[in-house]
Image (cartoon, rainbow, N blue to C red):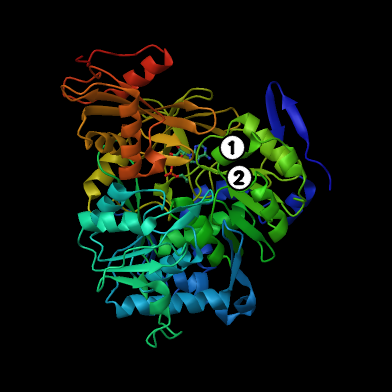
Amino acid sequence: MEEAVISQEGTEEIYYPPPDVVSQAHIKDYQSLYEESIRDPQAFWEARARELEWYREWDQVLDDSSPPFFKWFTGARTNIVHNALDRHVKTYRKNKLALIWEGETGETRTFSYFALHREVCKFANVLRSMGVKKGDIVTIYMPRIPEMVIAMLACAKIGAPHSVVYGGFSVEALAERIEDAESRVLITADGGYMRGKTVGLKDIADEAMARQPTIESCIVARRTGQEIYMEPGRDYWYHELMSLPITNNSCQTEEMDSEDPVFILYTSGTTGRPKGVVHTHGGYMVHIYATLKYVFDLKDEDRWWCAADPGWITGHSYIVYGPLILGATSFMYEGAPNYPYPNRWWRMVENYGITVLYTAPTAIRGLMRYGDAWVRRHDLSSLRLLGSVGEPINPEAWRWYYSVVGRENCPIMDTWWQTETGGFVITPLPVTPLKPGSATRPFFGIEVDVVNEQGESAPPGEEGYLVIKTPFPGMMRTIYKDPERFKTQYWSKFPGMYQTGDSARKDKDGYIWVIGRMDDVIKGSGYRRGPAEVESALVSHPAVAEAAAIGLPHDLKGNAIHAFVILRQGVEPSDKLAEELRAHVGHEMGPIARPEDIKFVDSLPKTRSGKIMRRVLRARALGQPEGDLTTIEE
Ligand code: PRX
């Protein structure tokens, strides 16, 4: 195999794809197809939609009569699970592996398309027998085990949108998502494994259900076998329900309208409670199908590993739905990347012959620090492409990933997208010349830009707001129960443009360089967290009067959460109290929201209307100029 060419243009590094990657690529010429797709985006998406199965075809590809509420493939009938499972079991794929899973404790479980389809049918029958109907939102709170994938697919199959709450969240985060979704059914597990320890998910679920008594039935998968409380009449074991005679293997897939919601996924914004981002059966399905097919060139013989958690959008789109729609084999691993040793991932790549690995910069940096030897002792020659997502990848991590993991043979697809966009928006293709740290160019049918405060296109090199200018099928439809917030949050700053919340620059070649969040959203370890959630967890502690949370740069995590706390009168600050507050946030929100550091302060910078000026806190912490302070009231 020939090595990729590395050229220097001035100070710029450009990496060209190896010839065999080019020769196998679905798309060989990005530019001409991109231009064509922008002249007629609907034709591009319609052609992709025709590659999938529909119960009834659409009357209209795009209904843009009431922006920003765009609708795709209106009048069509389909179900994402029909395309992910039903259609494959009628072909040779019946015997193909759909899912390979490895537990942190070392065991492997595999599911052919036939087996996964059967388990999904059975569990869908369980849900129906419990009274779950089309339109009911089911909350899923599980560790990274196959039952989670089965649960998600079973919900979609019967037209019940799922709301997956990441297993690293805790009591309050789970309770408020159950409340917003008004879920009556919760699917969880006794516990999960993480770094050799068990996490008691059912205990957390019990506390959340006590706060949110709308849950009538709770289904519990057995994973760790730890002692848990089972409430008679409310809690049921997954394995017991699955062996009941009513759960036979045949289950009719619900015919859905193209625009019916397939799931709701909560994500953090700057203010207030998490937003329930709504995605649909039709448009979302077409978008993730087309992006995964072209960006990672997935083929039948591939073994694809998206090392995210199904509880985040990356997992929804590219562990569960995308690979299955493409009929690929998806690998999923339960636990920590460095457990029991830092070669865990590389051993699995070798053992399972993984061909494409897609992960986050924070994981790459985390594994990089153990040195090359852990990687080099494994034969990773099965890999042909690599991927990155979640935050900008620093060139140092990019180069390590490229040279040590990819042996300078695997182009890195740095994909920029969001929970809101459902799938990739800015991304290379395997044939794209790469510049480390740039997600390169927009995907087909989508126009993006960097604009200044007035909404005018910024010249190359100038930092500005990253916006999207064309509707596309995977774009969120609304915020659940809050269409007004959808409009104001994303579509009000620049008329006719979707505001991503990120800042970016374009370069002279039209490559996009995403810099980071422009708002107060904190992106750390690939997780997205809102300051308001951390602050409200802090204020729920009796010692705290007021709190502010910000993100500050961190070598490994990208950003880490730092909190500033004003104590109630009479409470004395101490290291012990700071530790107690960090633990309290961990208990309420989950370990992923635990602040790195807590500082006790007497006042917080606020605007005259009482809003905390987090940018001022950030500037002070970094020793930078504090900017415009005309609105401050301190
Ligand atoms: O700031 C961008 C960053 O992640 C944000 C979206 O977060 P979330 O909804 O959790 O989705 C993450 C997985 C799709 C974006 O607004 N982000 C995501 N991918 C990249 C990125 N920043 C730079 N480069 C990326 N490739």
Q: How far apart are the alpha carbons under marks 2 and 1?
A: 9 Å
Say which of 284 and 179 sits in front: 179
Q: Residue 482: where, in percent of width, then height?
A: 23, 50
Q: Position of residue 461 (x, y in %)?
A: 53, 23
SS at circle 2: loop
Q: Nearer the viewer, residue 1 or 132?
A: 132
Question: Secondary structure beneath disc 1?
Answer: helix
The reply to whether the C-beta atoms of the residues labelled 2 and 1 are less than 8 Å apart is yes
- In the image: residue 561, left or right of residue 172: right
Q: 579 above or below 128?
A: above
Name the residue rendered at 22%, 38% in the picture: 540
Residue 426 rendering spot, x and y as whole percentages: 52, 42
**Local crowd at mark 1 within 10 Å, few (<14), some, or many (≥20)?**
some
* Residue 478 image point, x, y percent: 30, 52
Q: Tell me, for residue 338, which label it has, or none.
A: 2
Residue tagged by mark 1? Answer: 366
Q: Callout 1, which amino acid? A: Gly
